[in-house]
Image: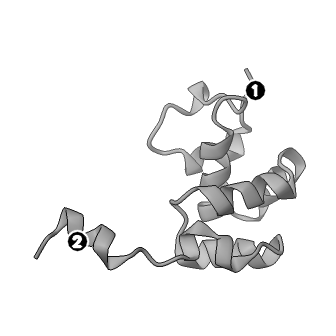
Amino acid sequence: MNKLPASLKKYFWDVEFKNIDLNNRKVYVLKRILEYGDEKAVAWMWKNFTESEIKHILYHYRGLSFKSANFWAVIVNARKEDVICLKRRLSKELMTAWPY
């Protein structure tokens, strides 16, 4: 089990921090740091994740704000048209949940 440094605890307010296993929860950890991380958290991220792992998050997972997704797309030189959080959802998709 790969533990996270105590300095990252503030980003995982909704779970039991001591039980987070980096090996099994890489996507979860990386998304939190990309969205909320400060300089210290980002420095740790660069030591533990590759640029391709960051791009993978941007291309395949929702959950980042438009602002964060755009920022990280610029930083890692990701294709913005492929960043899933920068794409608008079709109104037809939204209408299935609220048909009025």
Circles 2 and 1: CB distance less than 8 Å? no
For the view shown, which residue lies furthest in the left direction? 100
The answer to whether one can see residue 34 in this image is yes
Q: Relative to 41, does residue 67 appear above or below in the rendering?
A: below
Q: Amino acid at mark 2?
A: Met
| Horizontal and vertical percent position of residue 49 | 83, 48
* Image colouring: one colour
Quadrant occupied by the C terminus: bottom left
User: Which of the numbered marks, if any, corresponds to residue 95?
Assistant: 2
| Horizontal and vertical percent position of residue 97 | 21, 63
**Upstream in sequence: badge 2 or badge 1:** 1
Residue 76: quadrant of the picture: bottom right
User: Which of the numbered marks, if any, corresponds to residue 55?
Assistant: none
Disc 2, SS: helix
**Residue drawn at x 58%, y 25% as measured from the top left:** 19
Answer with left or right where residue 5 lies relative to residue 21.
Answer: right
Which of 16/65 is in front? Answer: 65
Which of 93/44 is in front? Answer: 93
Which of 7/19 is in front? Answer: 19
User: Which of the numbered marks, if any, corresponds to residue 2?
Assistant: 1
